[in-house]
Structures are given as structure tokens and as C-alpha cells.
Amino acid sequence: MKKAVQIGVAAMSLATLQAHAQSSVTLYGVADAGFDYLSQVQTGTGTTASRFRAESSDWGASRFGLLGREDIGGGYGIIFNLESGTNLMSGMAGDGNGRLFSRKALVGVQNDQFGKFTMGRNLFIANDQWDFDPMLQQAYSSTALVRSRNVPITSNNIEYQSPSWAGFSVHAQYTLGNQAGGFNLGAPNEVGRSDGIQITYANSLFMLRGMYDEIRDTNGKMSNVFVSSREFFAGANLYLSSLELQAAYTHLNAPDTPAGLASNADHYWAGAKYRVMPALSVDGAVYYVHVGAGAGDATHDPSGHATMFALGTTYNLSKRTLLYATVAHVRNASGSSFSVANNNPGSNNDNLDNPLPGRSQTGAYLGVNHSF
């Protein structure tokens, strides 16, 4: 009898250990490919032409990754996420700097009651503006008129995300520079010390978010309004059955900008997403940017402003596959050269698609997006 009890206790202990050690690993990804058209592409000094090409990642970034979790008991789980971007047209993976996992490489701990803590390479907190962008930060979206300032990826990232507490949630990040000689310095091809925090309130009718973040350059400075700067963000969503109304405002400031160059900008947008039928959606938005007083150079935009109009549609063929089409048009004031796409700032147009200063530009793309 005693032996039977011992065997039973051992079996129960083994079952408990197995339950506590349950784990899962998921392979996932997105494959996005299509065609795009762009007008006013610079081909030389003062000359432009239109371009038509096959392209990847217009509607959503093509990528693949591994997502894992091991339950360790008490409601806690150890999690990891490894993710790399890829270009379906060329087959190239990563970001061109030799990273195997260019988008995410992180590990952490998660608890439904206390939240999630991770460390590693991760999407910077500014990417969370996605929730308020009618165009979902696709190629023609809120990223265009801020030169990708709201979609960076940072290494040495420490992140905390809270659960929802009566509708409120907190998200915070701190990115270390990891360099000797200065706490704010960054490695080559990396940002310096960067950080951010946001507070969100959400319910079934609306969502509100306020965010503050800082990105420093390799030298530890906030020296370029669209690259390394302070950012203040406020966004709002209103949910009305099949219609979602969205609006946001961003103020950018770079206090270490070289004297005489523009050091601040304001970015506004408003738009809507409408589900015509379960499989068909239409999205539209207007974006406006105003760059404050100051000159420009090869890597800094001068004072000026631009307005972009975007309209898109998606049709779901299945739960994992959709067809998409988007068109956008940007109007530049004299001296401004913003593109409908999220190109680099400044007048150095090597391998970029910015129009000539003061020129308008139109772009369109269509394609297929499949997730697995």
C-alpha cells in the first residue's frame, strides 16, 4: 500500500512538472508581393521620370519568425521571438547589415496578471502609432511625411508592457547604447540611448493614447528631426460599427540640430476605415506635415510643408490571404521634397525616390498578402 502511494505521488509530481513545463514554438510569416507605380522619380540633376516595378512589402512587411513560450508555473511563461524581414523579389533577408534576425530577437517573461518584460532587438515604441493610422503604416501612410521616424527598430531594447487595468495600459522601452566613453553613445549603424513611454485607454467605443519618446544618434545627440529627435504623440480612435474614425498629432524636436538647420516639425492626420462587407474594406486618410524655421542640407529637410492623400482597399480571399490596392498623392510646398513613400530626409537623393523640391508626386500599388 505504501509503495502504491509512493508511486502515485511520484506520478502526480511528474504530471505537475510536465504541466508546468508545457512549451510551444510557432513558425509564422508574411509574404507580400505586387506591382507599384511612382511618378516624379529623380533620374539626374533636375530630371525626373515615372517608374513601374515589381515590389515586395508594399502593404505589409514580408517576414518570417519563430515565437515560443514555456510555462514555468504560477501563471508565468518564458517567451522568445526571432523575426527577420525578407524581400520576395530578391530573396534577400535581413536589413543589409548582416543581421540574421533584423526585426526581432528577444527573450522575456510574461504573466497575464503582471504583464510582459523582454530584452533584445525589437520594434521601437514609436511603431505603436500603427494603431491610429487608417493606412496601417503600409508603404503610403503615416510613415511618409516623417521619413520613417515612427517605424524604427532598436537593439539592446528593454521593454515592459502591462495588462489592461480597467481599460488603462502602459508600455515602456529603454534602449541602451552599450558603448564605452559615453552613456548616450551608440555603435555604428545603431542608435544611441533611446527610450519611450505611452499610456493607453481603450473600451468598446474608443481608444486614446499619449506617447513620449526619444531617439539619439550614434553620437548620443538628437540632431535630426526625422531621424534622431524627441517625439510627442497623441492619437484617438472612434469605433462606430463598420466605420472607424482615426486622428493623430505628432510634434518632433531635435535640440542638437546644427545651427541654422530646421529642428522641429508637426505632423497631423485624420482618416477612416470602413468595412463595406465582411471581406471588403476601404481606407482613406489625409496627412499634413509642417517643418519649422531653418535651412536644409544633404540629410536635413528645410522649412516647408506637404499634404498627402491616400486611399486603399483590401479584399480577403480567406482568413490568411488578401488582395490590396492603394493610391496616394503628395503636394509639396516650394522647397519641400516629400515622397508618398517613406524615404530619407535631405537633398542627397542617391538611390531614393523623393521628387524635386516643390513638385507633387503620385504613387499606386496592388498586390497579394499572405500570412502563415
Image (tube, rainbow, N blue to C red):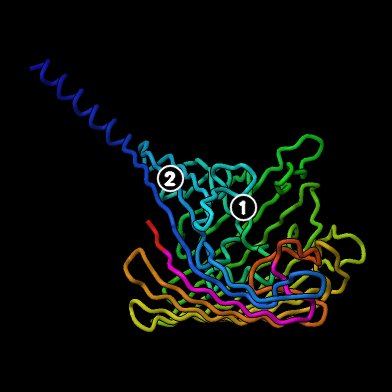
Residue in front for this viewpoint, 338 or 133? 338
Can you say whether 259 is above or below 133 in the image? Answer: above
The magenta segment is 353-369
Amino acid found under the numbered disc labelled 1: Ile
Q: Is residue 354 magenta?
A: yes
Residue behind mark 1: 153
Residue behind mark 2: 66
Question: Is 18 left, or right, of 173 in this rendering?
Answer: left
Image position, residue 152 (x, y; %): 63, 56
| Residue drawn at the location 50% of the way across and 64% of the way down | 60
Image position, residue 19 (x, y; %): 27, 36
| Residue drawn at the location 34% of the way across and 82% of the way down | 277
Disc 1 secondary structure class: strand
Position of the N terminus by quadrant: top left
Image position, residue 221 (x, y; %): 81, 52
| Residue drawn at the location 48% of the way across and 54% of the way down | 63
| Residue at the limit of the structure toward the right, as seen here | 259
Give the number of marks.
2
Image position, residue 49 (x, y; %): 69, 76
